[in-house]
Image (cartoon, rainbow, N blue to C red):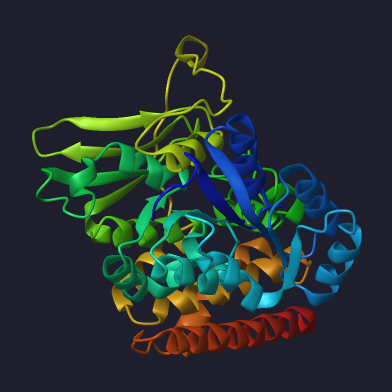
């Protein structure tokens, strides 16, 4: 994919989320390097209209048809911006020839279809939607290889690992002399909570991350360590490795974003303030570097770093993710589906925080893994996982009421 007019032409999938807004902030700082071709969002019409007025995309897509109609009316003074709706619109802008770079930042399973379409179209794909790769795994990576797409990881941990590896050996860790990957985790806001305290956690508390500014779903995932579990699976696919070669380190300061240990004893780490604009800028400009608007890191002010082993007894989601990867096939898609349903139920006040992993584990037991040979099989597993998770949530609620 070539860059025209000396600029990268970017489509942002999930423009109104935290990653999307951070991406546009970096773009805003470098108008000579980047321009926006398309923006997409779910239902946030007001935010989307504001972004369209500023960045003047050729296309704007809303996942919801009613929201698209509202946006079209709001943009009556911008006749050059075409408004589309639904998954078909998302896929259209993901593959459009006018854009060479796709920021894949739609949260959850909803991001799989357009992200996979962008990969198959051979785009430069900045992957912030970990669930897409978790769900489709081998299918996704095979599409990258066959299409010639450039896949650049944007999650801060995977971007850190990417930066610590030789570019030509990202998927050949033995050839690069890598012994293992050290994947860091903040531990979330409840790493010192007792099991009884975890049962009392509220959605507001779970959404208040100590270091990062993130959306609700990913904040809850961070608090349960499911975010790290999904990142474990993602790292295995991105870097062609296995959970046995990845060790999770809880690092509460969130300054060391991950490390790579080499066979000679060297450990390379990527450090930076907990600001997603750093990995986003790295992906947008790679292999060059640009100013991301992030303040310089003051190591004197930090003073020291701390590390702990993750407690998989109190936070079993990390274990469940590793087991799903080992099971293979559609098990990771079922894991993700069950987690999305459980987190939604928790945020809606239907489920106790500590019962999120209970729902996920029960769903994995009751939905057998199938071969993940094609997109339809993966999406069927996603639907089966969601239905079973909802049934488990309702069953648990009935038991709670009975007692």
Quadrant of the frame with the C terminus? bottom right
Q: In screen coordinates, is 124 left or right of 83?
A: left
> How far across and how far down the image is residue 115, in percent?
50, 66
Q: Residue at x 58, y 50 (%)?
A: 194
Residue lying farthest to the top in this orientation: 300
> How far across and how far down the image is residue 212, in percent?
60, 39
Q: Quadrant of residue 73?
A: bottom right
> How far across and how far down the image is residue 36, in percent?
62, 48
Q: Is residue 47 above or below residue 363?
A: above
**Residue 385 makes an appearance in the image:** yes
> How far across and how far down the image is residue 138, in percent?
31, 73
Q: In screen coordinates, is 152 left or right of 210?
A: left
Q: In screen coordinates, is 114 left or right of 311?
A: right
**Residue 184 makes an appearance in the image:** no
Q: Residue at x 46, y 42 (%)?
A: 156
Q: Residue at x 76, y 42 (%)?
A: 54
């Amino acid at each position: 994919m070539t860059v025209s007019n000396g600029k990268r032409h970017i489509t942002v999938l999930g423009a109104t989320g935290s990653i999307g807004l951070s991406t546009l902030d970096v773009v805003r700082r470098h108008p000579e390097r980047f321009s926006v071709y398309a923006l997409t969002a779910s239902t946030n019409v007001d935010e989307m209209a504001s972004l369209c007025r500023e960045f003047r995309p050729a296309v704007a897509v809303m996942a919801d048809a009613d929201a698209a109609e509202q946006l079209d009316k709001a943009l009556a003074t911008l006749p050059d911006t075409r408004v589309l709706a639904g998954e078909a619109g998302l896929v259209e802008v993901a593959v459009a020839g006018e854009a060479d770079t796709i920021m894949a930042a739609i949260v959850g399973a909803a991001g799989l279809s357009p992200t996979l379409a962008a990969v198959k179209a051979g785009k430069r794909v900045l992957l912030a939607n970990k669930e897409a790769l978790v769900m489709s795994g081998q299918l996704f990576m095979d599409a990258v290889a066959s299409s010639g797409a450039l896949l650049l990881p944007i999650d801060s941990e995977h971007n850190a690992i990417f930066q610590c590896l030789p570019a030509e050996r990202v998927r050949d860790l033995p050839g690069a002399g890598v012994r293992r990957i050290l994947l860091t985790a903040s531990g979330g806001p409840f790493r010192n909570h007792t099991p009884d305290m975890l049962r009392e956690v509220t959605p507001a508390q779970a959404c208040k991350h100590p270091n990062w500014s993130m959306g609700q779903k990913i904040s809850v995932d961070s608090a349960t360590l499911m975010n790290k579990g999904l990142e474990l699976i993602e790292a295995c696919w991105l870097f062609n490795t296995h959970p046995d070669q990845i060790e999770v380190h809880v690092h509460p300061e969130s300054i060391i974003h991950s490390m790579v240990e080499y066979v000679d004893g060297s450990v390379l780490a990527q450090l930076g303030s907990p600001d997603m604009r750093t990995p986003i800028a790295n992906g947008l400009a790679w292999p060059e570097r640009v100013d991301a608007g992030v303040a310089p890191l003051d190591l004197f002010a930090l003073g020291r770093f701390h590390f702990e082993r993750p407690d998989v007894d109190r936070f079993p989601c990390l274990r469940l993710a590793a087991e799903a990867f080992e099971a293979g096939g559609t098990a990771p898609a079922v894991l993700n589906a069950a987690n999305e349903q459980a987190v939604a139920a928790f945020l809606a006040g239907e489920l106790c925080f500590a019962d999120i992993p209970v729902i996920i584990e029960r769903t994995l037991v009751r939905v057998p893994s199938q071969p993940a040979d094609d997109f339809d099989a993966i999406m069927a597993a996603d639907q089966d996982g969601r239905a079973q998770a909802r049934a488990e949530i309702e069953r648990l609620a009935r038991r709670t009421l009975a007692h």
